[in-house]
Image: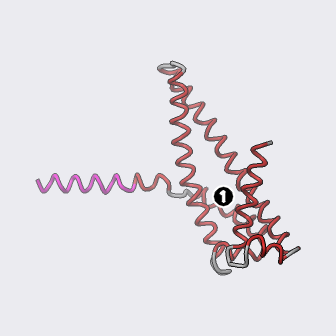
Amino acid sequence: MKKLLICAALAAAVAAPTTASAADPARADFKNAAKYCKEFKKASGANFATMFGTKKNAYGKCVSQTAKKTATEDAAQEKAAKTNAAKECKAEGLKGREYGTCVSTRAKAKQAAADAEDEALQDDRISAAKSCKTAKKDDAEQFSADYGTRRNAFGKCVSKTARQLAAERKAA
């Protein structure tokens, strides 16, 4: 009985890290996040620190948060792409090798489309940061009236503007 419990505990210990690491950021996630945060910091200027922390740790927080978010989203998108592709191929009545090829091809296409959308959303956010920086610089009173004077005012502006840019892009 004792041996059985030990084996079960070891099996659980081996399985737990495998399931937890599914959304852990890879090295590439951190590199991509660093590129994005560098561009975002450039676009935001001094406002960058108000969005992520103090001047001392804002860049690191941006990279860490972005990499974790990207890894989690990528895992969910990959799972959804495979599931939806399998449903589509099954609905067509494909079997065997044709089914496997269909699922693989469609899942890759869906993942590529999701990655392109993620890239476009990051571009929207960088463009929004640039326009909010300009708006704050040009008319600080109006900016304060629109978004407030609290620490998160710049973030509110970026969020709202990025959503508008994404909606315009999708409508076009």
Total marks shown come to 1
Q: Answer with left or right where residue 15 lies relative to residue 21.
A: left
Residue pictured at 60% horizontal, 36% vertical: 108
Q: Nearer the viewer, residue 49 or 6?
A: 49
Residue 101 on the magenta segment = no
10 Å neighbourhood of mark 1: few (<14), some, or many (≥20)? some
Say which amino acid is labelled 1. Answer: Asn
Image height check: is 164 above or below 149? above
| Farthest residue, direction right | 138
Question: For residue 125, which quarter of the picture?
Answer: bottom right
The residue at which mark 1 appears reads as 32
Between 129 and 25, the one lying in front of the other is 129
Residue lying furthest left: 1
Which residue is at 50% across, 36% downward?
83
Give the extent of the magenta segment. 1-17
- Is the residue 160 above or below the residue 169 in the image? below
Q: Main secondary structure of the magenta part?
A: helix
Q: Is mark 1 on a helix, strand or loop?
A: helix
- Residue 165 percent location from the top left of the image: 77, 53
Which quarter of the rendering shows the C terminus?
top right
Q: Position of residue 120 (x, y in %)?
A: 73, 50
Q: Indicate whether 169 appears above or below 160.
A: above
Across and down, in percent, residue 36 comes to 70, 61
